[in-house]
Structures are given as structure tokens and as C-alpha cells.
Amino acid sequence: MLSKVKLLVLAGAMLSPAAANATKVFNLNVTSASGTVTGSFTTNDARTAVESYNIVASAFGSFTGYTYTPATSTISASTLPSQYFRIDSPGLVNELQLYFSSGLSDTGGTILTSSSYEHEPSGGNRSLSGSVVAASVVPEASTWAMAMVGLGVVGGALRRRGKVSMRVGFA
């Protein structure tokens, strides 16, 4: 009996919420008079660093379009979560700067038009108009693993319990 109680306490501890880090995914749908900038970027839990990004600047008029990813560019400056981040391609050929009017919060941020732009050599600078960046939380893999182990322990404990038999009689 005591071992079953210990097992259930252990399972309860595994299933209880723990302080785990999570990355935050922000989705972009920014417009300008000369095309769109769409995609997403991921920050750490504190929103102080961009960890990943896949942002596409559309082709429009003299703009040829560019896809910003860690393979094609780097984060060259950042003052997140309070203000902005900038992504540059090698040789500073293409550049994307997203400046947030009131910082970047858990729910997103508003793009500040006067300081946000995308630069391409063929088209120059295009200002990005004030769009909201929507956010969603992605739990860490360790959080999912801990929950699955906890459920397995509870399932094992329930399986080891003695079977209860019940008779049903009809009159």
C-alpha cells in the first residue's frame, strides 16, 4: 500500500506545472505601399533574443524580394524586448528592421512605421506600416516528455491495482 502511495505522489509531482522555459513564436503580416513582409520569428522566453526566423519580403516593382532565414542572414542588432531587432544579409546587401512602438510583449507588438523598413539594393528602402505581431507559446520538448512520463506512471499504478469484480443481476 505504501509503495502505491509513493508512486501516486511521484506521478502527481511529474504532472504538476513546473517552471519551464518556452519559446515564443510571433507571426508577421506587415504591409507597405510596395509589397508585404510575412513570416515568423521565435524569441526566448524572456523575449530578449531572436532564436529563429523565416521572414519573406515580397517582390514588388523594383524590389526583387528576399527570404530572411538564419542560413541567409544574421541578427545584427537587437534591443528586445523594449524596441527593435535588425536582420542583415551577408555584405549588408539586404536589411530588415522591425521596430516596436511599445516593445514586444507576450501578445505581440505594434510595428512603428517611422523606424521599420526593408532595404534592397534594387529597390531602396520601403517603410513597413503599423501591423500587430500575433504571438503563440511553444512548450519545450522536456515539458511534453515530463507529462508523458507522468501519465505512464499513473497508468502503470492503475494497472497494478487489483481488479474489482461486479455482478449485475436482472430481476
Image (tube, rainbow, N blue to C red):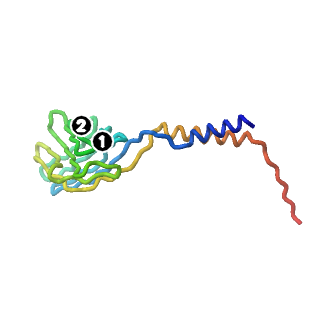
Q: Is residue 160 left or right of residue 102?
A: right
Residue that appears at 40% across and 47% down? 137
Q: Position of residue 135 (x, y in %)?
A: 35, 51
Residue 143's disc number: none
Residue mark closest to the camera, 2 vs 1: 2
- Mark 1 is surrounded, within 10 Å at the Cα level, by few (under 14), some (14 to 19) or many (20 or more) other residues, namely many
Residue type marked 2: Ile
Pointers 2 and 1 in contact (C-beta within 8 Å):
yes
Task: Tell me which label, 2 or 1, sits earlier in the chain.
Answer: 1
Disc 1 residue type?
Answer: Tyr
Which residue in the protein does label 2 denote? 75
Left or right relative to 167: residue 115: left
Name the quadrant containing residue 6.
top right
User: Between marks 2 and 1, how big is the CA–CA gap?
Assistant: 10 Å
Which quarter of the figure is the C terminus placed in? bottom right
User: Which sits in the foreground, 24 or 92?
Assistant: 24
61 or 42, which lies in front? 42
Left or right side of 58 for 148: right
* Element under disc 1: strand
Q: Which mark is residue 53?
A: 1
Q: Secondary structure at mark 2?
A: strand
Q: Where 166 falls versus 23 (above or below)?
A: below
